[in-house]
Every structure is written in structure tokens, then in C-alpha cells.
Amino acid sequence: MRKAKIFDTSVSSAVGRIFQTLYKRTVYRRIKKVKSLLDVSQIEPVLSGLFRKLPQTIKAVGSNRRPRTANCVEHFFGKFDRFYRLKHSFCDVNSAEKHIRLFMLGYIFAIKANGKPSPLENAGCDVKNIIFYHLFNQPNLMALKQRIALQYNMPA
């Protein structure tokens, strides 16, 4: 959309909604709608990437087994790649397993940049009662001590 210099909100919302359905037929109808909103010179930059990936992405529409997006997976592997580059290679299998477990624990519990929710929160887990979550993200030891005391009905 940026290459074609299209800043029309109706076009951008139509492009954004193409795959927000459970039916393949609706995807094709929405693609036709986007084509009708644009003239011939504007169609190529906007839809060229879409048509290249359409055979793979159309399989995920309406499927319960295939993920609809790979953004979460790509984000996880990007974070792990940075973690691995910092640690370099592992000495042995036990060391690798230990570091991978440490990475997984940190990845699941860590709040993302700009206060975005952690993967645990995105999965729908209620993190209010998970003490490790608060210790990991907001290490206020007095508040943590009080929460533990309240949980076990003990004086702080």
C-alpha cells in the first residue's frame, strides 16, 4: 500500500479484512472487492505479494489444524535466535537444555516492550495470582512479601 501511495482508509481496511474469515469463498470475494476499489496501475504493487503467497495462505482459511498466522512463531524464533547468538554454542546437551528452559521461562513470563502483554497473558491466562510473573516483571519485594502473606493468611 505504501509503494502504491494509497492512503484511502476504505482500501486499507478492505485489504486488512481479506483473511479475517473462515471461508475460502469469502477470501476470493474480498480480493475481487479490493480489485474493484483500485485501478489497474495500483493493483500490482498492492496485490503482487498476496498472489504469491495465496496458495499457501488459503489452506489455513477455515482449518482447525493450520495456524492462521505465523507472527507469534516468527517472533518466538527471532527472540530465540538473538538469545542463541548472545550465548554462542552450548557446551553439551545438558547445558543446552538448561539454557533453552531458561529462555522459555523468560519468554513466557516477560512483558513485551511498550507494556504489551506477555505470551502468557495473550494465551488468556490470569496472571494476577502468579507470584513469579510479578517477581519477574515488577520486582517489588515488599509488595511480593505482602501478597505471599495474604495468600497464606500470615502477617507480613
Image (tube, rainbow, N blue to C red):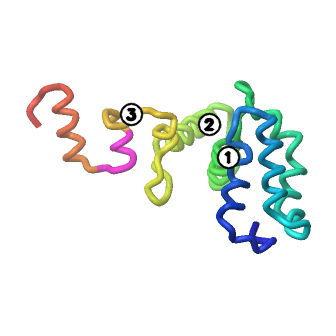
- Residue for point 76% across, 74% down: 5
Q: Quadrant of residue 64?
A: top right
Prevailing secondary structure of the magenta residues: helix
In the rendered image of this protein, does residue 37 appear above or below residue 136?
below
- Residue that label 2 marks: 95
Residue 27 position within the rendered picture, expressed as x and y whole percent measured from the top left: 78, 41
- Residue that label 3 marks: 126
- From the viewer's side, name the closer residue of 104 and 111: 111
User: Which quarter of the image is occupied by the C terminus?
Assistant: top left
Asked whether, in this view, residue 132 is left or right of residue 102, the answer is left
In the rendered image of this protein, does residue 97 appear above or below residue 135?
above
- Magenta range is 133-139
**The magenta stretch spans residue 134:** yes
Asked whether, in this view, residue 27 is left or right of residue 76, the answer is right
Dot 1 alpha-carbon crowd within 10 angstroms: few under 14, some 14 to 19, many 20 or more: few
Amino acid type, mark 2:
Ser
Mark 2 or mark 1, earlier in chain = 1
Disc assigned to residue 71: 1
Amino acid type, mark 3:
Asp
Mark 3 or mark 1, earlier in chain = 1
Residue 102 position within the rendered picture, expressed as x and y whole percent measured from the top left: 53, 39
